[in-house]
């Protein structure tokens, strides 16, 4: 007499378990391939072409390798600085003074831009002088900054703050002045105080322009960081290590510094884009 095989029979379970596991493996692989496929890799085309051209020129001796170090030599120099040199001290020093200058200059620029944008009297008194001063080239301030603050860390932070100050001040002023006057009239009808008018009407309406200024300030602050380390040479910094490489005719160190500077600048730019997108997400929802 034969009995029907139940669905919970161990033999069936033993036969089905390997099949289930076998089906799970392609799922993980497919998700990984789908992730890679959905990524836009076109931005890497130009860097890869430049790297290939660089390797070809140095490999076939089309340029003096003492002046243009090959990619392998730059990689070796970079590994040496990371594991045996003071790379992390230089990187920490550069990023810390960059963020310090960006914070000080951004806050000062936001305060001045707000004052000029909300007060006609302040605009009449300050704007003409501000428009004249902003025409002075940034590096023209270095002789005076070096006399007033020396050649050390305070001078570098002041110089970086000055670079971040102008774009934030200008964009904050323009953003506030571009706010539709009808918004303020509606707020007065609802009995908004000055603080409520600023917090609920003016600041949200001007926020895209303000974030544009902060984005530019972050980029200019990083450029000013390298410039400050170049012209106000003292202490640690990525720019200082590049200058040391130039003085010792170590082009591997110079080119490695260029790669680091470009990579950090690109990372800061992406960070600013993501923060701006996250902060202004409410505009997309309201639209």
Image: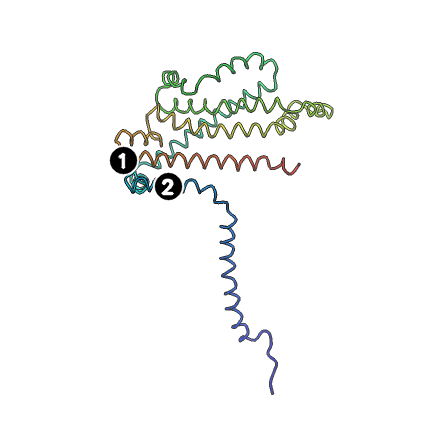
Residue 187, compared with residue 10, is above or below; it is above
How is the rendered protein coloured? rainbow
Q: Quadrant of the N terminus?
A: bottom right
Q: Residues within 10 Å of mark 2 (few under 14, many from 20)?
A: some
Judge from the rendering whether residue 94 lies leftward or rightward of residue 134; answer left or right: left
The furthest residue to the bottom = 1
Distance between the alpha carbons at the discs numbered 2 and 1: 17 Å
Residue found at x 29% / y 30%: 246
**Where, by quadrant of the figure, is residue 232 drawn?**
top left
Q: Which mark is residue 64?
A: 1
Residue found at x 60% / y 76%: 6
Q: Secondary structure at mark 2?
A: helix
Could you say where residue 98 lies in the image, as x and y percent from the top left? 43, 29
The furthest residue to the right = 189
Q: Secondary structure at mark 1?
A: loop
Q: Quadrant of the C terminus?
A: top right
Could you say where residue 17 lies in the image, as x and y percent from the top left? 52, 69
Could you say where residue 281 lies in the image, as x and y percent from the top left? 60, 37
The furthest residue to the top = 125
**Where, by quadrant of the figure, is residue 223 drawn?**
top left
Camera-side residue: 62 or 265? Answer: 62
Residue found at x 54% / y 29%: 212
Judge from the rendering whether residue 19 lies leftward or rightward of residue 85; answer left or right: right
First in sequence: mark 2 vs mark 1: 2
Q: Which residue is mark 2?
A: 51
Q: Residues within 10 Å of mark 1 (few under 14, many from 20)?
A: few
Judge from the rendering whether residue 280 lies leftward or rightward of residue 187; answer left or right: left
Could you say where residue 238 lies in the image, as x and y percent from the top left? 35, 32
Camera-side residue: 227 or 148? Answer: 227
Residue found at x 57% / y 35%: 279
**Where, by quadrant of the figure, is residue 110 drawn?**
top right
Residue 116, compared with residue 211, is above or below; it is above
């Amino acid at each position: 007499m034969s009995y029907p095989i139940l669905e919970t029979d161990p033999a069936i379970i033993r036969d089905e378990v390997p099949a289930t596991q076998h089906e799970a493996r392609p799922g993980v692989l497919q998700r990984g391939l789908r992730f890679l496929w959905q990524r836009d890799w076109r931005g890497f085309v130009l860097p890869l072409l430049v790297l290939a051209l660089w390797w070809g020129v140095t490999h076939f001796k089309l340029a003096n390798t003492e002046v243009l170090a090959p990619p392998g030599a730059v990689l070796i120099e970079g590994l040496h600085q990371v594991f045996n040199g003071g790379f992390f001290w230089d990187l920490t020093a550069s990023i810390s003074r960059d963020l310090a200058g960006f914070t000080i200059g951004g806050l000062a620029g936001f305060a001045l831009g707000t004052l000029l944008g909300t007060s006609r009297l302040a605009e009449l008194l300050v704007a003409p002088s501000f428009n004249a001063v902003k025409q002075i080239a940034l590096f023209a301030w270095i002789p005076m900054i070096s006399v007033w603050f020396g050649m050390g860390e305070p001078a570098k932070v002041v110089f970086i703050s000055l670079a971040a100050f102008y774009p934030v001040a200008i964009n904050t002023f323009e953003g506030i002045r571009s706010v539709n006057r009808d918004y303020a009239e509606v707020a007065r009808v609802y009995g908004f105080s000055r603080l409520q008018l600023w917090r609920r009407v003016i600041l949200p309406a001007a926020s895209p322009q303000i974030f544009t200024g902060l984005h530019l300030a972050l980029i200019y602050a990083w450029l000013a960081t390298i410039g400050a380390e170049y012209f106000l040479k003292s202490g640690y910094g990525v720019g200082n290590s590049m200058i040391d490489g130039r003085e010792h005719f170590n082009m591997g160190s110079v080119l490695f510094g260029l790669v680091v500077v470009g990579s950090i600048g690109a990372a800061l730019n992406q960070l600013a884009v993501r923060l701006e997108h996250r902060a202004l997400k409410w505009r997309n929802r309201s639209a």
